[in-house]
Image (cartoon, helix red, strand yellow):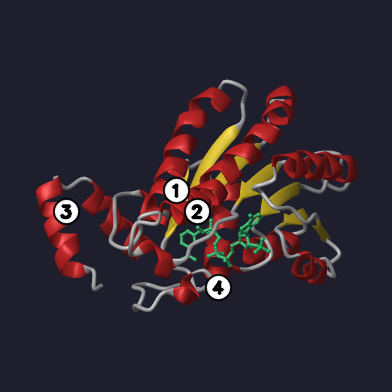
Amino acid sequence: MSEKQKKIWITGASSGIGKAVAEKFAKEGWKVAVSARRKELLDIMAKDSNIFSFPLDVTQKDQIAIVFKNIVKDFGDLDICLFSSGTYDPKTEQKIDPEKIKNVINVNFFGVVDCVKTVEDYFKSKKNGQISIVSSIASYRGLPNSSGYGPSKAALTNFTESIYFDFKKHNIKISLISPGFIQTPLTDKNDFSMPFLRSPEFAAQKIYKGLVNSNAFEIHFPKQLTLILKFLRILPYRIYLFLVDKLVKR
Ligand SMILES: NC(=O)c1ccc[n+]([C@@H]2O[C@H](COP(=O)([O-])OP(=O)(O)OC[C@H]3O[C@@H](n4cnc5c(N)ncnc54)[C@H](OP(=O)(O)O)[C@@H]3O)[C@@H](O)[C@H]2O)c1
């Protein structure tokens, strides 16, 4: 008897990391639901017979509920939800702009929180599956020119750590993804040279392996960068602030 086809829902799937991960899962034989606002990009991806388009703006709570209901209706069930939607505009992060910060936090943090809330009862009642959240190494500690993006991801990482304990009681795996610099439309806006920059396909390979073949809570890559940042995270403020001030050009 053939094995049952596994199913995943990916948000932020119209470009960059989410798109590459969707294509990787489809190539591995998974049935993939892809969501983002740009329907035309999702529809092109859906030419792959394993990919199905479900357009969605994660800032619209009602839309999330409708889209999730439609996916479960069409797919029958879901094994993994990967929430990868996110936004970043480096030019607006150099000065404090409360409205822009609220917008970034609304998309990057509350957009994901609302997605998790929408799927919570479904996973808790079926008592298996995995919810994975794409945060960032920018969540580890405060960095220059990151007055909105950094706090949005710090909140997201802390939220993911926090819900891990509750979902574990229901046999649901919660995982956290912390990418370093990946070449996507999001980082194309950076005007500095990004250390250990990797391709979206590299990220997709690491995420696929981490979600399917490992039990780790955090999937972080590339290690050459993430291990340095993990070390910086444990330094006392005096040393951390001195080093970042010297090392990060701005
Ligand atoms: N690239 C990196 O170096 C890096 C590093 C660390 C973390 N990350 C994180 O990785 C995730 C993916 O980023 P990326 O680098 O792949 O950038 P990207 O190519 O710009 O992808 C962002 C995705 O989020 C979607 N999105 C944005 N706002 C949305 C909204 N309101 N509703 C639904 N979808 C929305 C975009 O699609 P639409 O515009 O079509 O809606 C797009 O599919 C983000 O969470 C980002 O913070 C990236």
CB at disc 3 and ligand 1 closer than 8 Å: no
Could you say whether the residue bearing mark 1 is in a helix, strand or loop? Answer: helix
Residue 72's place in the image compared with 27, above or below, is above
Q: Earlier in the sequence, mark 3 or mark 2?
A: 2
Residue that numbered label 4 is attached to: 185
User: How far is mark 4 from mark 1, CA to CA?
Assistant: 19 Å
Sequence-earlier tag: 4 or 1 = 1
Residue topped by disc 3: 240
Specify which label sits upstream in the sequence, 1 or 2: 2
The yes-or-no answer for disc 4 within 8 Å of ligand 1 is yes
For badge 2, the amino acid type reads: Val
Whichever of labels 3 and 1 marks the residue nearer the N terminus, that label is: 1
The quadrant of the picture occupied by the C terminus is: bottom left
The residue that label 1 is drawn on is 152
Quadrant of res 157: top left
Which callout, 3 or 1, points to the residue nearer the camera?
1
Which one is closest to the eye, mark 3 or mark 2?
2
CB-based contact (under 8 Å), mark 3 and mark 4: no
